[in-house]
Image (cartoon, rainbow, N blue to C red):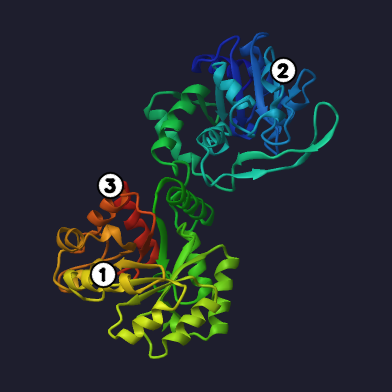
Amino acid sequence: MNGQELASALKEMGLQRGDIVLLHSSFVSLGDFEGGPEAVVDAFLNVLGSKGTLLAPVFGELGILTSIIKQHPKAVVSTAPVGTLAAIGAKAKEICEDHWKAETAHGDGTPFMKIADLGGYICLLGVDQDRNTTLHSVEALLQLPYLGTTAPKFTAPNGKRISKTWKYYPGPHRDFISLDHYLREFGVMTKQRIGNAEVRLMKACDMVDICLELGQRDPAFALCDNPSCEACVRQRADIFADRIKNHESFRLSASSRLAGRYVPEIIDNLKANGLLAVELDFLNGRSAISLSVDKLTAVVAEFAAAGIAISALRAPAIPADIDKMLTAIKDAGINRIILPFPYFEDALTKIASTDLAVSFVNTGQATVDIVRLLTNIRKKLACNCSFTFNPKNFVLANENPFLYSWRVGRFIKTIGQLDILDASWDTVSTRLAAGNSEIKELISIMRCHNFSGWFTLGAGGSYPGSLTDATKAFTHLLDTM
């Protein structure tokens, strides 16, 4: 193949004089090419003419054609040390100047968006969407929560050595390849074989608009769903954590029993699912209240070092030595405890003396009894007292948790936590919204009240699956409300 044949093929694909083209390329994909890589660059420049502009990314080792464009005597190199481009042609300086002043490496004010604003093209010669750097521009425009920052030192155009932070900087892995079919289906990309190479050509602004729409519908649009891809698992977790923190009123945790058996395993599973809080109920197969003060303190410190908060410690029963339990919990740095309702007045008196936040959970009582107990306790307790609503246990009491228990009890006035789990009438645990706990209705009505307390996955009972299963089911409920 030769330069004239390549130029003809590019014109056939739609390129013409005066166009702006950002080229991502693999020279070897063309096969044997008369004149070598220099002839390929010349073919592009001949098609674009004196009023056109050819650009290529020049960060890292990106191929021989990129090197030739960067080393061209008329080349202009953009002024940022990240996302750097080289350009040849009429608008080279206009596109590349002041790149270093932009807040991001790829977003507004960068050469990538200038190319789109000027009606320029992206050409993928023998490479796929995985090399399409402008897709990072879409991520930056969307300000996706899994993006990071970078702050390399560099020499500014004024000659000063400075360090600058670029926000919304991309991470290690994307599934940009899966976006290819959208661009074909929307008809904004031309694809043609030139030599041995598959060549894709698209208007940058059209591609950006389509991918912005995809990203607004699904912030994980550029991530793969491979559970073995640690990078995308982590980035999906970042999206979920951002959703809970910035777009929901409630706080979310998970029971330690659901998250794993040992603390390191629990931490890994929480982080993989974007959860930043845990309720301590069982560790290593035993109730957390059975731990010594030193061990419990070490557990709390280990979670804190990993950035995991303790939403509460849940006691399955009130021990004979209540004072010892309450002191141990406080000394370990935990400030909230969930208890079953006390049967005896002396137990209530001891609980009343603590300055811990106390939440009482139903364990099989009927609503009328819970209301009576709560009224009595709130009159007597000077401590911070609330109610933990366990829908599975209202099913155990043969009540409809939403249609009856919630409405009759008017628990919105006292509730501090909703246990997120489900069960059938025969008390068998089910996945969320597959039993009789009316969990979807409960979540929905509490969101209507902008509930600011805790939703805790798998708390107060068993869940028929992993923490990942529970998180996905919970997310599905939120998405379908």
Tag of residue 375: 1
Q: Earlier in the sequence, mark 2 or mark 1?
A: 2
Badge 1 local density, few (<14 within 10 Å), some, or many (20+)? few
In depth, the one of 204 and 62 nearer the eye is: 204
Task: Name which residue type carries label 1.
Answer: Thr
Badge 3 local density, few (<14 within 10 Å), some, or many (20+)? few
Tag of residue 480: 3
In depth, the one of 77 and 44 nearer the eye is: 77
In depth, the one of 397 and 411 nearer the eye is: 411
Q: Earlier in the sequence, mark 3 or mark 1?
A: 1
Name the residue beneath numbered marker 2: 93
Q: CA gap, disc 2 to disc 3?
A: 49 Å
Q: CA gap, disc 3 to disc 1?
A: 36 Å
Q: State whether residue 317 appears in this view.
A: no
> Residue 434's quadrant in the figure?
bottom left
Task: Name which residue type carries label 3.
Answer: Thr
Q: CA gap, disc 2 to disc 1?
A: 74 Å
Task: Name which residue type carries label 2.
Answer: Lys
Tag of residue 300: none
In depth, the one of 165 and 343 nearer the eye is: 343
Compared to 56, does 479 lie above or below?
Answer: below
Q: Is residue 456 left or right of residue 153?
A: left
- Label 1: element kind: helix
> Looking at this rendering, what residue extends furthest in the right direction?
159
